[in-house]
Amino acid sequence: MNSLPRFAVGRPVLVNLLMVGVVLGGLLALFAMPQELEPNVSFNWVFVTIPYTGASPKETEDLIVIPVEQELDKLEHVDELLSTAGEGWAFFFIKFEEMSRADFVAAMQEVRMHVDQAVIPSAAEDPVIEDFGSDDFTPVISISLTFEGDEEQAARVAEDLSDEIKRIADVAKTQISGLEDREIWVEVDPVKLNAQKLSLGAVVRTLADRNVNLPGGSIEVGRSEFLVRAISRYESPEEIAQTVLKADAQGRIVHLSDVAEVRMVRAESTVLSRLAGKRSITISVSKGAGGATYAIVDRIKELVEKYRMHGPSGINFEITRDSTKDISKIIGVLRNNGLVGIVFIFCILLLFLGTSNALLATMGIPLSFLVAFVLMRITGQTINGSSLFALIIVLGIIVD
């Protein structure tokens, strides 16, 4: 059998075409791969949080933690399951075994299904299920809204901007700092309540019975299985105010608005956020796995610019963190170091081996890198500080 070098020398056209294909394929892969600060590392962790307002830790454990744990115990490939019951909340930490990204996504769907099947009190809020990876440590971009005056107007603008950012492809989540959640207050007038011969306990029970989200089991249709839930949740303060408390013998109906005032307010502030001496609201954005940081940040900047031009007066928008600047800086430094290394290698080879051998060895370095880019693209890798540093390290190995 002929050797590979003899085969290549005997077919120069084929070899040249292969080289052109490697160059074109490598360049296409290089420009198509997302550029990141560091590679995303999935820890295969899932967090489940279930708020249960007003419940003690013991009640949360008995009514939420134990039923949900019984369902989560049915999951496969679970390495660790931890649960915590607190005052008004239950938290579950699920760590899966090592698996591919596709298998982990399927495992998260299994978690959602089993949590929905757990029988928990109707007063508990909907579960919040999130995964956790290295991208969650640092946001790709942070936007701060500074304002003076109407806080509620700034809050509405921040929430609208956050909602629009969530619709951008590959955005995993947004987190708003400096803005407390909305609460609905029902302030009962004792005089009006007594006049209608009602008690405060009756009002509480009526609101709890009206605001329900109950599991109803499942229905099997052929090979498909559908979960059934009875949902009757309040959507607005106006809807709460129209709740019927009682109807007397004459058919007169007493609504909640007849004995109480229903209004939406912000929870008491626990964190004060300021930028340049002004009150601010900060929106931090995290991307999903496989998302291109540059594309996400550019799209968010366009959105922020639209709000800056057409938003209410008195609200300023500032980009306080932009990870693309850090990415460009690190990749630029590593790229320059790599080019300097190639030049040094060429000079040393030229000094000891001559021009032809130096050129041949030096040309093999970028060709080897282009092949690596193709393989990185195929396996779903990204251009980041770690991958470029690894390529620089192997410069000497390629020459050897």
Image (cartoon, rainbow, N blue to C red):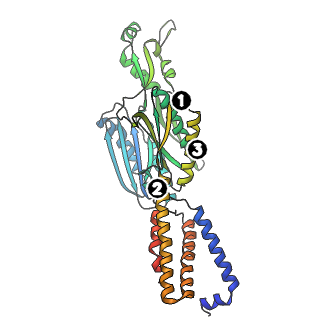
**Are the residues flagged by discs 3 and 2 in contact, CB closer than 8 Å?**
no
> Residue 337 bears which disc, if any?
none
The residue wearing badge 2 is 326
Residue under label 1, please give it. 313
Distance from disc 1 to disc 2, alpha carbons, whole Å, reads 32 Å
Tell me the amino acid under the disc marked 1: Ser
- Inter-mark Cα distance, 3 to 2: 20 Å
Which comes sooner in the sequence, label 1 or label 2?
1
Q: CA distance from mark 3 to mark 1?
A: 19 Å
> In the structure shown, which secondary structural element does the residue marked by tag 1 occupy?
loop
Q: Give x and y (percent) for residue 158.
A: 50, 35
**In the picture, residue 378 is in which quadrant?**
bottom right
Q: Amino acid at mark 2?
A: Asp
Mark 3 lies on residue: 302
Q: In this view of the protein, which residue sits in the foreground, 281 or 6?
A: 281
On screen, residue 305 versus residue 139, left or right, reads right
Residue 322 in the image, given as x and y percentages of width and height: 48, 49
